Image (tube, rainbow, N blue to C red):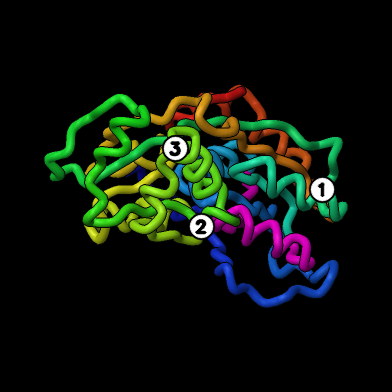
């Protein structure tokens, strides 16, 4: 796994975060970014580069996109929101909690099936027959299918191949993709459906199948300034969409649409 830079202060808000008063006061002069959990490593890296170039630091809250969106709607102080799907960005846009003129599709990703690196399971092409033969005795994990983006994509893909009802009884749902990744890494479950970029970071998991892009909605990470963003957030947004940041994103396996 890539190093986690000590220069970055990471603020994690749990899914059961308290309700925030509207326009809640900021407790830091740093630029506050709410970002999907699957961006943890790459944004930590980019934050380090930004601090080296500008001498300014970011405070980043990594969690499930649904939890972060709700916190923003409840008035949590944040300057920038990066969601792992368009659904939750649309939700905060509907409630006028972002600046829609700043919204950009920042990244894209692939959906993969993983298992422990010590598992005897080998790679296979995804189709209805191959998925029907997957051994689910050790359970499978992904994000909560009704709220977490990775779970939404996973359900779509399994449904596309008429296998949702087959997989559903064995499914363990989590509140973010990193939680699912860790369950597979610790061999607490046999399989997981996660993003390709997350799987690539873990040496003790392996990808055994990649779901075709046609089997689910495009995996898009939109980014936008929040309604009450600070002035410095404009510079941070420009950096996140710059060629320098793009190079770092692609080095972690993300695609830039």
The residue pinned by badge 3 equals 162
The residue pinned by badge 1 equals 93
Query: In x, y percent, where is residue 181?
Result: 36, 51
The residue pinned by badge 2 equals 144
Residue at screen point 56% across, 30% down:
108
**In the image, is residue 59 part of the stretch drawn in magenta?**
yes
Would you place residue 176 above or below residue 2 in this image?
below
Q: Dot 1 lies on which element?
A: helix
Q: Are marks 2 and 1 in contact (CB under 8 Å)?
A: no
Q: Quadrant of the N terminus?
A: top left
Q: Dot 3 lies on which element?
A: loop
Would you place residue 228 above or below residue 257 in this image?
below
Residue at screen point 68% across, 55% down:
32
**In the image, is residue 63 part of the stretch drawn in magenta?**
yes
* 244 and 117: which is toward the camera: 117
Mark in front: 3 vs 2: 3
Of the residues under marks 2 and 1, which one precedes in the sequence? 1
Residue 228 appears in the figure:
yes
The magenta stretch is 55-77
Q: Residues within 10 Å of mark 2 (few under 14, many from 20)?
A: many
Query: In x, y percent, where is residue 83?
Result: 63, 46
Residue at screen point 61% across, 53% down:
65
Q: Are marks 3 and 2 in contact (CB under 8 Å)?
A: no
Mark in front: 3 vs 1: 3
């Amino acid at each position: 796994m890539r190093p986690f830079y000590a220069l970055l202060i990471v603020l994690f808000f749990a899914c059961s975060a308290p309700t925030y008063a509207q326009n809640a006061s900021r407790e830091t002069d740093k630029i506050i970014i709410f970002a999907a959990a699957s961006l943890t490593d790459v944004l930590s890296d980019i934050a380090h580069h930004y601090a080296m170039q500008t001498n300014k630091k970011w405070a980043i809250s990594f969690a499930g996109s649904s939890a972060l969106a709700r916190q923003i709607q409840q008035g949590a102080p944040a300057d920038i929101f990066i969601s792992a799907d368009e659904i939750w960005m649309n939700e905060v846009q509907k409630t006028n909690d972002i600046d829609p003129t700043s919204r950009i599709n920042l990244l894209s990703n692939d959906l993969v099936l993983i298992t422990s690196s010590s598992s005897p399971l080998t790679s296979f092409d995804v189709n209805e027959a191959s998925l029907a033969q997957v051994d689910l005795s050790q359970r499978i994990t992904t994000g909560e299918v009704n709220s977490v983006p990775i779970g939404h994509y996973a359900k779509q893909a399994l449904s596309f191949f008429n296998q949702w009802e087959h997989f559903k009884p064995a499914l363990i749902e989590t509140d973010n993709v990193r939680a699912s990744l860790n369950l597979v890494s610790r061999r607490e479950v046999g399989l997981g459906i996660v993003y390709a970029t997350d799987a690539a970071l873990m040496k003790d998991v392996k990808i055994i199948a990649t779901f075709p892009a046609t089997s689910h909605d495009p995996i898009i990470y939109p980014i936008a300034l929040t309604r009450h963003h600070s002035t410095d957030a404009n510079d941070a947004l420009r950096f996140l969409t710059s060629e320098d940041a793009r190079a770092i994103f692609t080095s972690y396996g993300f695609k830039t649409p």
